[in-house]
Image (spheres, helix red, strand yellow):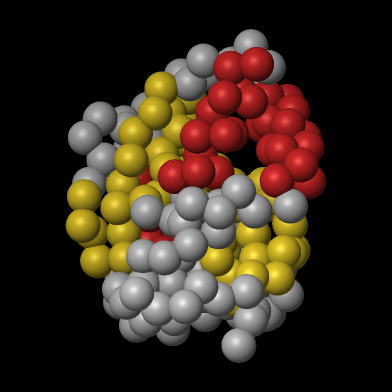
Amino acid sequence: MSTPRKIKVLFDAETIAKRNAALVEEIKARKLDNLLVVAVLKGSFVFAADLLRAMHKAGMSPEVEFVHLSSYRDSTVSSGTVNIMHDVESDVRGRNILLVDDILESGRTLAFAKDLLTARGAKEVLTCVLLEKPGKSAVQIHADFVGFECPDLFVVGYGMDVAHSYRELPFVGVVEK
């Protein structure tokens, strides 16, 4: 077993929870009927779960689905190719979709998922990301709802990992060298 590494906290659990509540109010204001939340696995699972609980608290009752896409595998750098590991099982035709992802960096994964759901006949596909790294986009996509602007660092925690480690952390942080 390797020695645990020190993690510098960028966004603590309380700050994230407050921002999630604010994001839900922004989403609720859009008055999206027949809403299907599609969480992009694996990185967004904690964010999506907390967002869904905040939606319930705000009186919303969306349905939930998952898509597992990967462009990183065991690397800290995107391969540039998005692979579908697990597809959405529900029919999205005519539905309002809220695509939830952990981080908008190159934009390839989010653009791929948005294009896929749009091509399948979704009424509208909106995007919600916990973190956005400005100036890193390799494709033209902007998130409709953004939790936080993130510095150009490789982040872990709150569902995000490096080689499957650190997902369990209740905050977003950076592994210190």
Q: Is residue 131 visible?
A: yes
Q: Position of residue 163 (x, y in %)?
A: 36, 72
The part of the image, by quadrant, that contains residue 6 is bottom right
Q: Is residue 72 above or below residue 100?
A: below
Q: Can you give x and y, in whole percent of width and height, for residue 19 in the image?
A: 76, 41
The one nearer the camera, 149 or 1, is 1
Which residue is nearer to you in this view: 35 or 129?
A: 129
The image quarter containing residue 177 is bottom right
Q: Give the residue displayed 63% in from the left and 25% down from the top.
A: 54
Q: Residue at x 37, y 51 (%)?
A: 41
Position of 85 relative to 153 (above/below): above
User: In percent of the image, x 52 and y 80: which residue is there?
Assistant: 138
- Observer-nearest residue: 162 or 33? 162
Residue 168, given in percent of the width and then of the height, sits at 49, 52
**Is 116 displayed left or right of 147 in the figure?**
left
The quarter of the rendered structure image containing the N terminus is bottom left
Q: How many marks are shown on the rendered structure?
A: 0
Q: Eyeballing the image, is 88 above or below 59?
A: below
For this orientation, the residue located farthest to the bottom is 177
| Residue appearing at x 55%, y 59% in the figure | 157
User: Front-most of 63 and 114?
Assistant: 63
Relative to residue 173, is residue 15 drawn left or right?
Answer: right
Give the image location of residue 20, x and y in percent: 69, 38
Horizontal placement of 54 versus 108: left or right?
Answer: right
**Do we see residue 72 in this rendering?**
no
